[in-house]
Image (cartoon, grey):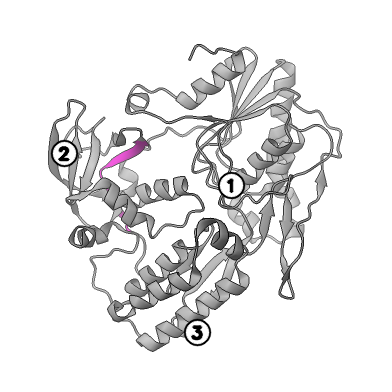
Amino acid sequence: MKQRLRSLAPWLLSGCLCTQAPAPWTTEQLAADLDQIAAAVRSEWSYLADRRQNSGVDVDALLAEAKKTLPQVHSADDFARSLRRFGAGLQDGHAWTSVPGESPPPARRLPFGLADCREGLVVLTTAAGAGAPLHGDLLVAIDDTPIEDAIRAAAREVFASTPGMRRQLAIAALQRTHTERVRCSLVAADGSRRDLDLATVTAGAVPPVRPATENWSLAWPRAEVAVLQLHSFEVPRWREWLAAKPEQREPFLAEGRARIAAIIADLTARTARTLIVDVRGNGGGTDLLAIHLAERLLDGEFLYFQLAGKHLGTWWPPAGTTYGKDPRARFPGRVIALADEHSFSTTDNFLRCLQDLHPDFTVVGRRTGGGTGAPREIVVAAHSKAVLGACTQRVYGPKGELIEGRGTAPTVPVQWTRADWLQGRDPDLEAALRLATGDRSR
């Protein structure tokens, strides 16, 4: 097992086959930095107590594990990996780490795109000239490492709040590499296995597994059923939004709010009875847009979420702001959300709000990423200048339950199959349409 995982090292996020400069710090300095980082986590991280109690996160054990690696740290990349594993062990999807001098992420990737399904990892798209027709094959090993072992190894270095999100991010990490070639073992639909030595490609050379669709677009698969594609809660000119002061952000919201108003008007004009909101892959954005949409889907005044912060060493009780006071037109019908492991952050807040408060709300798909909580940089280490960021607020749903680490569980769970992907079916949408039309034939 150790040899297999060692052969996998170039696939992990920090793996690099380039020449690395020696680490400019002593083992003692790095140990002191790790102590400083762990102390900041204990003091500033908002989910320390909850993660310890409900997920078994042990900061002392993570610290001890990181210190064990220090005799083998000979470069900035080595220390970056040790710190990343410490940070990933917190199980906070908004956490991050960085170390000055570490190598950039891999610029190359496998020459095909993968999707997770009941049968395993299925190849769906390939780069031009990939070397063999791979469409529909299952990837079962990378460089002789069984794929599930590879996923478990990669999962140690990704930042995720729920197991489902951790698996998906690990699968994504496995597809990136610094190497020029990789040995892949694949199984075809007839059960035959082949081992291929494939050239890797640049990131943009592989077509996306899912075709891109327009954000905030509305489609009508049935006369009284609309589907809202909502892949992001970001406002236009997102980077400018992030750089702007809070009092300067109002103009950025105008376009998004106008789009929401147009959508509600369209739903009203066409007398829609059900709105399916597709937030699969929606990693978040700003709650100000999500709140505005929630105001048009909920009747009356409501708490969108409740927040708790730390002041003078004490966590104050959660409290929230009341929304929905503006009597603008609302959509009164049923709402069904399509969600998956990549629905995260603002999207988690939005879904929890509707789940807690909407009288006719259903979630179809898979448990969301379950992460929220005002992430920020909480420590810069004295010697290495390594940085760790994590959540610094506690976010609760309107009914007072934490969102972090829980996410939103689907009312109707759906697991995709190999045939679903290969035949172009969307079992999430199919399940939602059956709910919307009262079809219980499946």
Determine whether 224 is above or below 98 in the image.
above
Q: Earlier in the sequence, mark 1 or mark 2?
A: 2
Question: What amino acid is at disc 3?
Answer: Ala
Give coordinates of residue 338: x percent, y percent.
Answer: 55, 31
The residue carrying mark 2 is 131
The residue closer to the viewer here, 427 or 233, is: 427
Q: Which residues are magenta?
A: 106-116
Question: What amino acid is at disc 1?
Answer: Gly
Disc on res. 382: 3
Give coordinates of residue 86: x percent, y percent.
Answer: 43, 68
Does the CB distance between marks 1 and 3 fall below 8 Å? no
Q: Earlier in the sequence, mark 1 or mark 3?
A: 1
Give the residue drawn at x 60%, y 51%: 238
Does the CB distance between marks 2 and 3 fall below 8 Å? no
CA–CA distance in space, label 2 to label 3: 49 Å
Does the CB distance between marks 1 and 2 fall below 8 Å? no
Disc on res. 228: none
Disc on res. 284: 1
The residue closer to the viewer here, 330 or 167, is: 167
Question: What amino acid is at disc 2?
Answer: Gly
CA–CA distance in space, label 1 to label 3: 33 Å
Give the residue drawn at x 37%, y 35%: 209
Give coordinates of residue 36: x percent, y percent.
Answer: 52, 81
In this orientation, does residue 352 appear? Answer: yes
Magenta stretch: includes residue 114: yes
Q: Earlier in the sequence, mark 2 or mark 3?
A: 2
**Residue 80, picture quadrant:** bottom left
Determine whether 214 is above or below 69 in the image.
above
Q: Secondary structure at mark 3?
A: loop
**Residue 126, picture quadrant:** top left
